[in-house]
Image: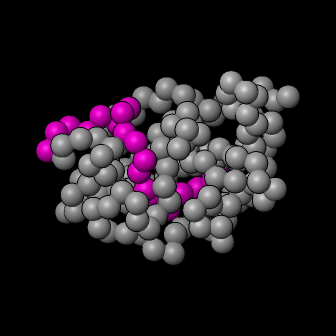
């Protein structure tokens, strides 16, 4: 059994200054690397947690349902699902449900999307979606992610 990896930070403290507003409401350009998580599946069907880095210059979308009224200050600690135009895959960890919670069992090199199986994630590579939606819908083209591993696993 693996011990909890150190990159799994369940209480990430991010500050709004990391983002610069764009001309599109809800869209931001990343000014500093943004460390995020998503769930997906291994080739053999295990649920996995992927830790990723949204690179400087990438665009992200934070939907209104993620932070409430768009005219208010964004509280990144309370954001839900978001999406990005690119992400570097830092690590992929297979998870196993022990009856009470998920536990990490092994590191993997590859994973696949749970919503679009042909889309693959590979440790050490940058992934770019075929399409990054520029509309206000939360569920649109892009690399979907959460700011903490717990949210990603529960999605």
Residue 114 is left or right of residue 143, and the answer is right
Q: Nearer the viewer, residue 73 or 112?
A: 112
Tell me if residue 35 can be seen.
Answer: no
Tell me if residue 153 can be seen.
Answer: yes
Q: Is residue 12 above or below residue 127?
A: above
* Residue beneath the point at 28% across and 41% down: 67
Q: Is residue 75 magenta?
A: yes
Residue 39 is left or right of residue 131, and the answer is right
Which residue in the rendered view is the most extreme toward the right? 1
Q: Is residue 57 above or below residue 108?
A: below
Q: Which image quadrant: the N terminus? A: top right
* Residue beneath the point at 14% across and 44% down: 71
Which residue in the rendered view is the most extreme toward the bottom? 130
The part of the chain drawn in magenta is 71-90
Q: How many marks?
A: 0
Residue 32: percent from left, percent from top: 42, 46
Q: Quadrant of residue 69?
A: top left
Residue 17: percent from left, percent from top: 29, 40
Q: Is residue 144 magenta?
A: no
Q: Nearer the viewer, residue 57 or 22?
A: 22
Residue 8: percent from left, percent from top: 62, 32
Q: Nearer the viewer, residue 52 or 66?
A: 66
Residue 11: percent from left, percent from top: 49, 26
* Residue beneath the point at 58% across and 56% down: 88
Residue 75 is left or right of residue 70, and the answer is right
Which residue in the rendered view is the most extreme toward the left? 71
Q: Quadrant of residue 141?
A: bottom left
Q: Is residue 149 above or below residue 1?
A: below
Q: How is the image coloured?
A: one colour
């Amino acid at each position: 059994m693996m011990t909890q990896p150190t990159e799994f930070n369940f209480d990430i403290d991010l500050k709004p200054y990391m983002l610069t507003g764009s001309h599109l409401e809800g869209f931001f350009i990343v000014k500093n690397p943004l460390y995020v998580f998503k769930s997906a599946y291994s080739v053999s069907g295990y649920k996995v947690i992927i830790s990723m880095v949204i690179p400087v210059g990438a665009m992200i979308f934070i939907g209104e349902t993620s932070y409430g009224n768009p005219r208010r200050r964004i509280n990144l600690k309370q954001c839900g699902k978001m999406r990005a135009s690119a992400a570097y895959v830092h690590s992929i960890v297979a998870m196993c449900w022990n009856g009470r919670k998920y536990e990490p069992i092994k590191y993997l090199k590859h994973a696949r999307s749970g919503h679009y199986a042909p889309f693959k994630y590979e440790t050490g590579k940058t992934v770019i979606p075929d399409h990054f939606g520029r509309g206000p819908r939360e569920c649109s083209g892009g690399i979907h992610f959460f700011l903490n591993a717990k949210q990603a696993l529960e999605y």
